[in-house]
Amino acid sequence: MKSAKVFSIICAAIFCLFVLAGCAKSTKSAQQTEKISIVCTTFPQYDWVKNIIVGNEDKFSVALLMNKGSDLHNYQPAAQDMVRIASSDLFIHIGGNSDVWVKDSLKEATNKNMVVINLLETLGNGAKLAETVEGMQDEHHHDEDCDDEHDHEEQERVYEEHSDHARHNHTDEHVWLSLRNAEIFVSKIAEVVADLDSANKDAYKANAEKYTAQLKELDAEYTKAVAASTRKTIVFGDRFPFRYLVDDYGLEYFAAFSGCSAESEASFETIAFLADKVSSLNLPAVLTIEKSDRKIAQSIIANAGGSKAEVLELDSMQSVTSKDIEAGANYLDVMKKNLGILKKALN
């Protein structure tokens, strides 16, 4: 079904390309120079590019595809998105399972000199395989299939099997939620931008170095905050896209679902397990991602034996809209806000 939908979009995009190509000839011939076209799939990429090209913005056309609040797991490109990609000079995408449509779209590229940055490939061995931690509900959970008489050893066996299955089949796509990864990506993007506009390469390098210094400073703040915290564990009553972040600072986590899960209803077993963690560890908060209805988190607290925990929100930047950007949303500010929330959850 998904492949058929992508095929239909590609066909529509090809038609648009032929139409636009004819219309564009006269426009192109009339222009002395054209702007360098950069297309980004997600908000963090877009914001990094914007910081790199400061001072030379007039030389670029930067487009963000996912700008309506839909996260990368649900995004399907429109025909006009495919056209933008096909004619771009630089296309930046994540490279995970949610980007299955990218391969076909690149086959229709009209700009044969297009440079493509795949963030997972850029990260190399730093990319992490998805994991299922203890207590996490997997995609195939069904209450009617659960046997309340399962003993502890059986639960451990199932947990380990699911962990192995996840590790061998999916790469965690949420790479931007590590400030250390962000440094790598900014460096790579700046390198490509400098090649596309070599006359101003020193400016792009300087901008990247300035921005990277800010990333390093914030990373140091995270390290200091975690080292000083009274707890090293968080509980998520939601999907958990923050594995890269918690791994950077040695934190332990328990969550209702993995970061890529499509589940929205937690089982009684999942709620009970997480509630026990909140109670036994005396945690002050249960976390969710942005735009959560908070029902699972609230249920966890309600079942945590009189816990006074509150529901707090960490922003994974998967639902950023064009209006948010116009209002000043940016990667560093979101990560700073997340640090403040994390401090509350750990103390």
Image (spheres, helix red, strand yellow):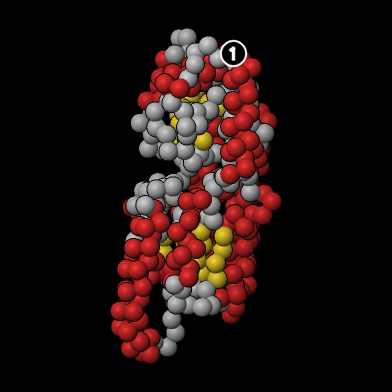
Give how far across and how far down residue 27 sits, in percent.
34, 85
* Side of 85 relative to 158 (left or right): left
Q: Nearer the viewer, residue 159 or 208?
A: 159
Q: Nearer the viewer, residue 162 or 114?
A: 162
At 62% across and 42% down in the image, what residue appears? Answer: 168
Neighbour class for label 1 at 10 Å: few (<14), some, many (≥20)?
A: few
Task: In the rendered view, tell whether residue 172 sits above or below residue 267.
Answer: below
At 45% across and 59% down in the image, what residue appears? Answer: 101
Give how far across and how far down residue 72 sits, in percent.
44, 50
* Side of 252 relative to 19 (left or right): right
Q: Quadrant of residue 129?
A: top right
Q: Which residue carries the number 1 mark? A: 151
Q: Quadrant of residue 219?
A: top right
At 33% across and 88% down in the image, what residue appears? Answer: 26
Image quarter hosting the C terminus: top right
Q: Quadrant of residue 21?
A: bottom left
At 54% across and 48% down in the image, what residue appears? Answer: 173
Residue 240 visible? The answer is no
Give how far across and how far down residue 13 sits, in percent.
35, 69
Give how far across and how far down residue 43 sits, in percent.
45, 54
Label 1: element kind: loop
Identify which amino acid the numbered label 1 is placed on. Answer: Asp
Residue 6 visible? The answer is yes
The tally of labels here is 1
